[in-house]
Image (tube, helix red, strand yellow):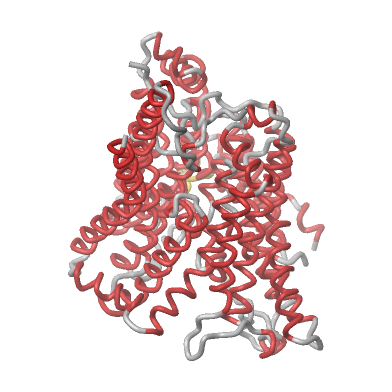
Amino acid sequence: MISDLFSMTVLVGILASGIRLATPYLYAGIGETFSQRSGVLNLGVEGQMLLGAFAAFYVALTTENLWLGVLAAIVVGGLMGLAMAFVTINLQAEQGISGIGFYLFGLGLSDLLFQKMLGTVETVKGFPKVHIPVLSDIPVIGEIFFRQNVLVYIAFALVPLAWFLLNKTTLGLKIKAVGENPEAADSLGVSVVRVRYFTVILGGVLSGVAGASLSIALLNVFQQNLTSGLGFIAVALVYFGAWRPWGVLGGALLFSLVNSLQLWVQVLGIPIPSDIAVMMPYILTILVLVLAVSRVRPPSALTKIFEREE
Amino acid sequence: MSNHNSERWFAKLIDTALPILATIAALLVGAVMLLLLKVNPIEAYRAMWEGAFGSKNALAETLVKATPLLLVGLGICISFRGDVINIGGEGQMIVGAIAGTVVGLTLVDWPGWAVIPIALLVGFIGGAFWGGIPGVLKAYFNVNEILSTVMMNAIAVQLMNFMLRGPMIDPSQAQLASKIPQTARLLEGFRLPRWVPTRLHLGALIAVVLAVLVYILLWRTTWGYRIRAVGQNPDASRYAGIKVKRYVVLALVLSGAFAGLAGVMQVYGVNYRMITDGSASGFTGSAGFNGIVAALFGQLHPIGTIPASILFGALLVGANKMQRVVQVPSALITALNGLVVVFVVSSEIWRRRRQKKRLAIATAEAEGGDEEFPSDPDNEPEVLA
């Protein structure tokens, strides 16, 4: 049975589902990278994802239009981001704790709406797999990378896009300046408030889409606490990836590949207790945090309140 | 002079009132949500009130729910005062409960008066251990504790599922097809005394006593002073010769210990067995998170956390009644709890602003040769001598 694990079909299966499972972490993690690079720790990702997931699912179910579902997730996630921005930037609330508040809010509200508007667990026909012409016919590689649904492709395209935005544009420069030294950025005429509003709302939007990728592309259901801690892991992956989009990609892939491996281990009936197998990605993340984080310094102004001297 | 005193008194009153205003604001938002759900909010809130305080039994249930919130909240008071954000209450409760339950299921020949305290102590230590891991990771490996405690929660849930489906499963369930993840029942002699006919158990009283002890720990002992000093200004603490890393670990160890105690008390006081539905909240009832809410509401003061826990216990118990009477899912209360947290931390800005003003006045007075500014935990100077 252990040897089954090394057959070609299984290996391809593990890799393909690993790529797919990385999707929500990529959206949420890239979004969180932006807000943290500007100095705002958004711990409400999980709540934003849950509400995004519900909105996308409900709209997709009732209108039978998946893109309207994604749009709904964008709007809902953006609104949650807006609220988070107002609370942490204007009201200068402690970021970590207000994030927990937004998490509980999203957890409760998504459950409430689910029970009141749906009542039972239903399924929706989610985004289908799109075979990229030519590329999907390459043996092994094609099956792993080029037969995924469209939200997977967009998630991976976001990584170089985010890298470009952060490192090659003025906006990226402003974001990093605001996250490292807001006083200096302010004295150079950069609006700290405006930049942070942008990044926190962007983070909310991407968290919403992360939720949608679960409810209408990967799992195609909605239920209570659908994300079960996934949003928190996305935040961990940002630390893990040292606040760089490519690093987040690495973390997301590592985490989801181990996750995919443990799922296949269970499918193949290899005698490891499933509860123990499920622990593995979490233990691994802690271990890698130990190895990775101690070497990299977070953005200097992360979680610090910025108050403009009048 | 007396004018200033009354001003201070008034400011203090507003500080205490802020969380209450935050709750009222959250309940108002809840009322709007209820209206959107086409439910009469007055009717819904009345059902909540009756469910929480309407009878002796209701009140007892409220206190039963408040007990784990208070215990977790006490741990939160310690860790947050030390600027350590412990989100791992759920996992620490679970591990404490597993450890403590093993005691009761193993020492079956021992007398109850010995087993109960040992079990509670073991649960306390179990939680301390689970909290200590992120503590060490934060202090010595620079791993953010918010992340590691969240991971430790996920690991604890799987550990619980593994133990309750495997080594610790109720022998009678092991033979059934259903295989409900639960342990055997504790012997009758191993249960915390109850105020019959209600389910209110001795744990509630223990928690209140511990609240006083945590107050003494934080404000009357060197340990507590150092934990708070490290929380307020780690650099200054280091210069003052405090071993900062050690107190970061201590804050998480103690915080985890109280959560562990909360977990083991759920077993010995309420359920008499450890049982779950496979999720963390299936065992903890989300007390690991709601305890944070209660502690924040109590302004991270152990004594303030007592009424705060009762309030949130009441909300939880009342939510169940509301669900039965007006068919509104109790998830509404989870959402409102979240709003309370957001509103409370948002209202801090006014407290800080007034504090700044007060400090300015105090400085002016001190220069004028006035009496010393009264010492207040919230007004302690940022930089330590």
Residue nearer the viewer, A291 or A275 = A291
Q: Quadrant of the C terminus of chain B?
A: top right
Q: Judge whether A144 appears above or below B28 on screen.
A: above
Q: Residue at x 70, y 45 (%)?
A: B249
Could you tell me residue A176's position as x and y percent? Answer: 49, 20
Q: Judge whether B299 appears above or below B191 on screen.
A: above
Could you tell me residue A174's position as x and y percent? Answer: 43, 16
Q: Residue at x 64, y 84 (%)?
A: B191
Q: Is residue B359 left or right of residue A157?
A: left
Quarter residue A82 falls in: top left
Number of residue marks: 0
Can the viewer see residue A142 in this picture? no
Residue nearer the viewer, A38 or A238 = A38
Q: Is residue B78 left or right of residue B362?
A: right
Q: Is residue B101 left or right of residue B7?
A: right
Residue nearer the viewer, B51 or B3 = B3
Could you tell me residue A309's position as x and y percent? Answer: 37, 17
Could you tell me residue A138's position as x and y percent? Answer: 62, 37
Q: Judge whether B55 appears above or below A19 on screen.
A: below
Q: Quadrant of the N terminus of chain B?
A: top left
